[in-house]
Amino acid sequence: MDKKEKLEKIKKLIQNTMISNIGIEVIDMGDDFVCGKMPVDNRTIQSFGILHGGASVALAESLGSIAGSMKIDKNNEVVIGIEINANHLKSVEKGWVYGKASPVKIGKKIQVWEILITDQDNKKVCISRLTLAVVKKS
């Protein structure tokens, strides 16, 4: 399956989920990364009119989990988030934010991913680390 087909498959998988409902789109992927974007609009801002930290965390966990699922035997395993942290570095009022999930460690039972979120000017908005457990399907 080529990259375009993989991106289309992911797009279908995330339809009608929180991911699609807040406007997250997966825009690029490779063997060891997944990139996406999210709008800064009425779905993702907080009451002060800036990007909600929880929306940044949702973007981070979504990209990291998609990336993690690319590193397992999907017939027999799933990845489940067990810990996420985020440092919010800069506020954003409008436009888009972009995230890139990159591996820190890919193990048989645990994966750790770093997700960097930037604004349209490539300035750091949030840095997050996601830990995933690799578990056998029941």
Image (cartoon, grey):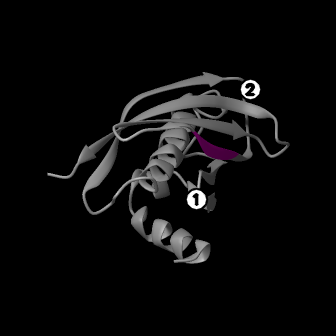
x, y percentage for residue 30?
62, 59
Q: Is residue 87 above or below residue 67?
A: above
Query: In which quadrant of the rendered view does residue 93 lie?
Result: top right
- Horizontal side, residue 34 vs residue 20: left or right: right
Q: Nearer the viewer, residue 103 or 126?
A: 103
Q: Residue furthest front?
A: 108
Is 31 placed above or below 100 here?
below
Residue that lies at the very extreme toward the right in this rendered image: 121
Question: Residue at 66% across / 37% down in the picture?
Answer: 116
Mark 2: give few (<14), some (14-19) or many (20+) Cα within 10 Å.
few
The residue at which mark 1 appears reads as 25
The magenta stretch spans which residues?
98-103
Q: Amino acid at mark 2?
A: Lys
In front of the other: 45 or 99? 99
Q: Quadrant of residue 52?
A: top right
Q: Nearer the viewer, residue 103 or 50?
A: 103
Outermost left residue: 138
Dot 2: element: loop
Return the x and y of residue 1 as percentages of the image width and height. 51, 77
For the residues marked 1 and 2, what is the alpha-carbon distance in whole angstroms? 21 Å
> What's under tag 1, amino acid-wise?
Glu
Res. 51 mark: none
Q: Is residue 9 above or below residue 101?
A: below
Q: Secondary structure at mark 1?
A: strand
Q: Residue at x 26, y 43 (%)?
A: 135
The chief SS type of the magenta part is strand
**Mark 1 or mark 2, which has the lower sequence index?**
1
Left or right of 22? Residue 90 is right
Q: Which residue is mark 2?
A: 90
Identified at 53% across, 48% down, the residue is: 63
**The stretch drawn in magenta includes residue 100:** yes
> Which residue occupies the foreground of this view, 4 or 111?
111
